[in-house]
Amino acid sequence: MAGKAATVFIIDVGSTMWQKTVDNTGATALDLASKAVQIMIETKIFSERKTDKTAVIAVGTDDTDNDFADDITYEHITVISEIEQPMLPLLRTVSNELPRGNVSGDCFSAIEVASDLITKHCKHLKYIKKIYLFTDGESKIGTRKNDSLVHEIRRGGIEIKIVGAGFDDPDTGFKEQDKSIIKAANEEFLRKFAEDCDGDFFTLSYFLNQLESPQVKSIRLVNLYKGKTLVMGDAENYPDSSLSIPIEIYSRTTIARPKTASKWSVLSEVSSIDPAIKTHEKQADEANRVEVPAEDLEKAYTFGRTIVPLISYDQDLLHLTTTASMDILGFIRTEDFRREYILSNVLVILPPQSDLDASLRVSALIQGLYVKNAYGLVRYISRANADPKVGIIVPYFKPPRECLYFAKLPFKEDYRACVFPSLSNIKDKNGKILEQHKNLPTKEMLDKMGEYIAGMDLMEAAVDEDGNPKEHLKVKETFNPLLYRITKETAHRALRPNEPLAPLNERFLYQTKILPSLEEKNRKVVGELNELLQIKKVPPKAKRRRAEVSRKGVGEIDVEDILGSKDEDEVMEDVVTKKLKSASDWSFEHDVSLEDVDVRKIGIVDPIGDFNKMIENHKEDLVTMAVEQMCGIIKKLVTPSNGEKADNEKALQCLKTLRGVATRENEAQKFNDFLRELYKESPKEQSKTMDFLGAVANANITLISSDEASDSNFSKYEADQFLHAINDMSFVILEPEDGREHKSKKISSGDDLWDELMS
Amino acid sequence: MDNNEFEEEEYEEAQEFVTKINSTNRDAVFFAIDCSESMLKPDSFDIGNGESENNDPNIPLRSAIRAASEVCLRKIIDRSQDYVGVLLYHTRKHKNKSDTNHIYVFHDVDFPDVNRIRELNELASAEIDFNEHFGSSDEEFPLANVFMACRDSLAQLSASFKTKRIFVITDQDQPHKNNPFLRSAAITRTHDLAEIDIEINLFSINRPDKPFNFNAFWSEIICQDDLKKNHINTSGDIEVLVERVMAKESPRRSMFSLPFRMGPNDVLTFGVKGYVLCIERRKPLHQWAYMKAEEIKLASSQATYICADTAQRLLTSDIKYSYSFGGEKIVYTADELHELRKIGEMGITLLGFKPYSRFKFHYHLEHPYFIYPDEEKYEGSTRTFAALHQKMLEMEKIAICQVRLRKTSVPRIAALVAQKEELDEYGAQIHPPGIQMYYLPYAEDLRPLPEWSELTSAPSDLAQIAEEVINTLTIKSGFSPEKFKNPALKRFYDVLQCIALDKELPETYTDTTAPKVNAIRKRVGKKFIEFNKRILSTTSEIKANRQDLVYEVKSTRTPRKATTGAASRPKAKPVSEDGSVDVEALWKDGRAEKATIVDIKAYLTKIGHTVTAKRKAELLEELDSVLKQKYSD
């Protein structure tokens, strides 16, 4: 509904309006009236519609400025702004420059002036005409006959809305204390007048409350498929034995996007428009980028690594030549249709307005589908040379309203069939279905969940104006907070450029959270359910644990799983999580890592390179993970699985790198533990690791001492001794807890040393 | 196109996301194709339908190569960041890094490209003589070496490769039958591969004389579980083989990993991952190629912003954002705009439940997100989710949630619909268990039904014919995306491929989505003839009735209006033709002062008199003089 509109706001600025506070925040009636007008003007300004015009009249001003200024009846009425598209200066005026009068003006005369403004502006053209009057009713109203004005307003189709401060509110039972006789009389008069005009009468507080609720803008309907038909069969060659219906298509749902911000240059004071200039750079290689002129460029597509430049002839061939059409391909039963296939918004298919023939045809189809419980499968080409789409048509049959809904469906290329583990059917490794498993809810859990679902029902969770229960979060009653916020914030900043961002209206937070009454009602069930389900947050250290697995030389698949040596329960659990893990290790929380491909795992081929990349990751702290994985790699290199040679040289290089990083990055303890662990395990691995440890000793790689890194428990002496121990094949026991006195004794078994070092 | 980040539409974000996922979750496939003598023999399964090129008998090796070629092609189109390699074994000649006999690395794992596809096609169509270049050898050699060779290539790939797979295509169900040592070496080797996340898939081919016996050897290698179906018997049919290979082409990847809150203050919060199983795929955007270099190079475009005032190049820090508002620009920094979007908590917050029937058809906005529990961040997520899932299905409820997928996204309200797991007759999953999450519209996203949706309803005889047509043309199997290939995408890539491979362009194309008009005519043509006839008679009938109706309404309405108007408002002013107060009539009645200023002014203006007076008295005088003059004439 983008019709033309003319609105006149009349604000009473008489002395009582701004001298008396009307609420507990210290606001006067004028403050509130001005706020209400501001909100309405803001919305109009934001919509930027040239045909939505506004005038503002103040009544009760000391001065007089209107077309009938000579008549005493129209004294103290000032037209602040004629009917025009509202701009920011008007908002500023209403916000903080409204005149304050010390006299009283006649509100009724003001309405006459307003009506006159509208009549003059709108002439006999079609407009939506509105007059708002904000007053406290304290100023005397001339007791002329109001018939002619009432008549004129009704005839002109002007909507009158009278908003009174301190007026009686029959809904809430509000009545002002010590109401003056004048006010009571005026209130009665205005109420009667509004009734006569078929207008509305509000109290200011109610009105403001309504205004602060989000409003939905009406949008002009656009026919998306002009002058075309819905066809079944070969309408071109056999018009008689086919079905052809003229139709129009409109949007039923479309995501309303917030207005987009345009770029603004800080360098410029005056003009803020800065057109983007595109430059093209030839990518010789990453380092040498050269700017090239646009005329030397051709459109191209890549096919694998082959660049396919296109001459215009080819370009035409790439695309299908089509004509706009909508064809019914066949029908399907509703029970065979899966809603998850729908991948677009919903459109409405209707016959053209007052086309009887088409109406009957569409209606017959709607009824047929409705009765047969069927949907139609269609192919839709929205305009000439557009790509064909497949879609579904669904009947809506609520006489007198009938229509067809349309939504797009996926092609083969759009859909990815994926397999996920069953949630109810968990088998052990012998294929036996398990009755109990940690991933299976117990009957108790299920019952409690049922109780929770019943308790959290929204159908009667909210309360309507009359105190009766009603549905909470109806689609029609939820609003996009961002749309609202941007409008509010822009107006806020326009008026107060130096203030920080305005906080979001509480009303919107209300739809983002559990309703307090529901929360209260379900507190017990939630607690019990929580007790039953025992969900445990995995501490962020979880990643370390995973890395420890890989220290065993294992990626995400544990050989033991396959060999089946683990506890059954554990196996199933691992299989499930493993699948999830291998599906993706990626989540939005690591949003940034999308930019480049981050190394998160050290490979055997270039461990040092991978390791360094992980350490250098500035977006995420992967140090611990890297250190742990590196330990795993070293061990793998040193004790390879059968058939491969140990690569002690590579392992040594890795160890050196690891030591350097561990010293710097507070991971000395991990390094020390690792080296000692390697030693401890060595007897089991026969001489393989011993060879390596010998090489370590020869290369003078020691434990990290507390001199080097503060998180080390070993003195320099101890660290060096460990190395010696390897070379001598005889070991020194270190007892760091004995202060700095080092007792030592020779032993011959490595295991003992390990035990001692671990204590 | 302005690349303003605040203009990003969710749809584009999702598209972009798919691209990003493809580049961070790459897949490498190494085909290991058995070239034993038996693989070169035409198999008995060829039904001679002439589908294979040149009416060649179906040779398993060629089918395998063709499958590899097809996979390369699809990879180029669908997932250009992925790698494909082809290794031939049981060859007479050899070519590989470690100089092992009987292994010929035809293509090492790398980007599939046009030349590779050409080579594979030539090999498949015998333009390259297999015998001359590779030769077949049935000599026994360690199968373990094949896995080693694959490993050498796959293990060195960067961490962006999230899946690495070996696709073994063979008809040998019992390699190393008489050599337990080599047999166990091969098995051990595959277990090593598993350790470094290399997965083996087997595509077995039946020999004419005996079907493939999976349990003889391969069952020890292939982790056979219900979900992954890592062994597929293809009976040597290329179509099946390619379809099977491609069916394995969509390893699932999560789009988000978020907390799911069922209670306040993180009580009853568990973890879920979200997936997009269905999203519209579009043709790629064109790029720019620089033609003047020796070799054609791609150019990347970069937008540079120049200040309109100072003509200076702007840095990111020089750019702010503005909304125009009432004739002025209201300016924000990028950070402030981000701040505005921070509404509600990240994640999924359950607000309550409604009956399924409240999820009306016209609430669809876009594709749903599939959510599934995630134990990684919360232990016990699976049982919690499973309980919720099961009870929602039983109670036929949907959950209403507040959803914020990421820091910059606008919060939405969503409906969660539990989806039952569905299996086919063999126990394979057709529809996974989980929850579909649909964004619900906000009030702002709903458009009203146009007024004229109050249709003239069709009489039952017409509806009856429609029912019969629907009955006759009901597709029994329902809708499945598998049934329709996108004709525009197919055309695009067919042509692009032809240009790239220097092949002749296809002259015609068949649009598989086109309606089968002849079949429709054959089945329901007669019903349409009947329908069209009846429409004609019904419309004329209704039109005839309507004229009577209109006449009746008119004759009853007019007097009513007159009487009620006159009765209830006796003092009403006379109304002129155009609906305004008839000032002239009032003046004649001597009641001119009853007219309002506005009326008088309007009247005077209408008759072409320039109004100067402001006060009512003056106006009346003016009116008087004007009208007196008029009637004296």
Image (cartoon, grey):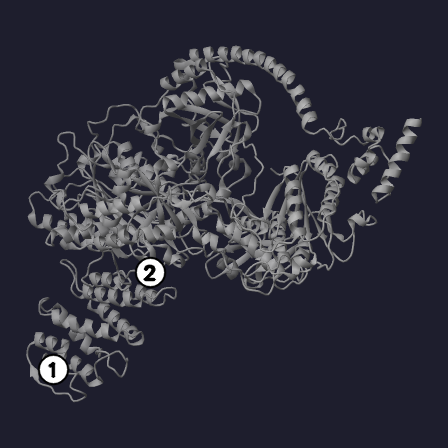
> Can residue A360 be seen in the rendering of this structure?
yes
Q: Which residue is more in the foreground, A247 or A634?
A: A247
Per the image, label 2 sits on a secondary structure element best described as loop
Figure check: A616 above or below B192: below
Q: Which residue is more in the foreground, B39 or B134?
A: B39
Residue furthest to the right in view is B633
Q: Nearer the viewer, mark 1 or mark 2?
A: 1
Q: Which quadrant of the figure contains the C terminus of chain A?
A: bottom left
Q: Position of residue B624 (x, y in %)?
A: 88, 34
First-in-chain label (1 vs 2) = 2
Q: Position of residue B526 (x, y in %)?
A: 43, 11
Residue under pointer 2: A599
> Can residue B294 be seen in the rendering of this structure?
no
Q: Which residue is more in the foreground, A112 or A3?
A: A112
Q: Position of residue B628 (x, y in %)?
A: 91, 31
Residue under pointer 1: A733
Amino acid at the residue labelled 1: Ile
- Badge 1, how many Cα within 10 Å: few under 14, some, many 20+? many
Figure check: A540 above or below B352: below
